[in-house]
Image (spheres, rainbow, N blue to C red):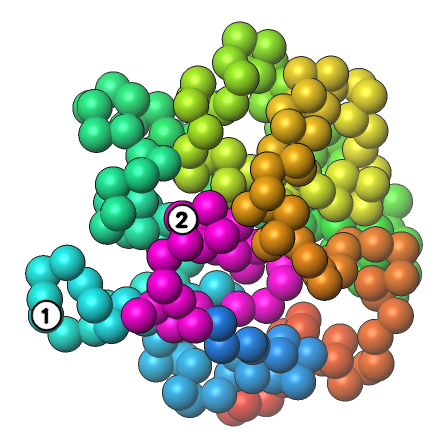
Amino acid sequence: MIDLYYCGTPNGLKMKVFFEETGLPHRIIPVDLGKGDQFKPEFLRISPNNKIPAMVDHDPVDGGEPIALFESGAMLLYLADKIGRFLSRDLRGRNEVIKWLFWQVGGLGPMAGQIGHFNAYAPEKIPYAIERYARETHRLYSVLNTRLATFDFIVGDYSIADMACYPWIVPHKGHGQSLEEHPHLKRWFETIARRPAVVRAYVGTKDSYSASAGNISEEERRILFGTSKRKAAS
C-alpha cells in the first residue's frame, strides 16, 4: 500500500492521474494547506520542504523498510520504475521522458505557478510581475506546442511526462494563456482530458488559479505564502 499525501493542486493532481491510470493500490491522506497541515511534524518527517505531494511506499520492491518520497517528479519516476509502465526501459526512450519531466518541474510548473499567483492571489496587481511571468509561460507553452507538432504525446507514447505537464495546462486561463494560439498543444490537451483515468482524477477538483481562487482569508494567505512558516521557525 502507498500513502499519498494530497491536495488538489497541479502537482498533487499529477499523482492522482498516475494512480488512476495504473490502479496501483494507494490511500489518499488529505493535506489542508490553508489550515497549515503541511507544517505538522508528522508531515515534515516525510516532506521536509513542507510541500505536497508526498508519499510513503509501504511495499517497496526490495522488500525493505517503507520508502518516503517528496517532489512530484521524483515520485513519478519512482512509481513508473516500480511498476514498469509509462517510462521506457530503453536507454534513449527513458531519457527522453526524463528530460521532459525535468523540463516541467524546473520550468513549466514554477513559471505557470508564478503567473497564477500574481493573477489570482497577489493582494495587489503588479504589472511587471504579471507581464514577466505571462510572457515566460507563453514561451513555455510554445515550446510544448512545437514538440507536439511532431508527436502525439510528448515523447511519442503516453508517459509520466504527459501526466506531469497536463495539470499545469489545465488552468491556462488563470495563466493568461489561450490554447487557440497553440493548436498542437490544444489537440494534445483535449486528447488527455478525454482519458477516463484523467476524468476520474479531476472529479470534484477546483481550479487553483481561477478568478475566485484568491478569495481567501488573511490567515490562509499568511499560511499559504510563508508568514506562518517563518514564525514557526523563530
Residue range corresponding to the magenta coloring: 1-27
Gap between marks 1 and 2, in whole Å? Answer: 23 Å
Instruction: Specify the label residue 22 is tagged with.
Output: 2
Q: Position of residue 70 (x, y in %)?
A: 38, 63
Q: Position of residue 91 (x, y in %)?
A: 20, 24
Q: Is residue 19 magenta?
A: yes
Q: Quick check: 226 left or right of 51?
A: right
Q: Quadrant of the N terminus?
A: bottom left
Determine contact: label 1, label 2, CB under 8 Å.
no
Query: In this orientation, which residue lies closer to the viewer: 188 or 199?
Result: 199
Give the residue displayed 63% in from the left and 63% down from the top. 8
Callout 2: SS: helix
Q: Position of residue 206 (x, y in %)?
A: 75, 60
Q: Residues within 10 Å of mark 1 (few under 14, many from 20)?
A: few
Q: Is residue 203 visible?
A: yes
Q: Is residue 191 magenta?
A: no
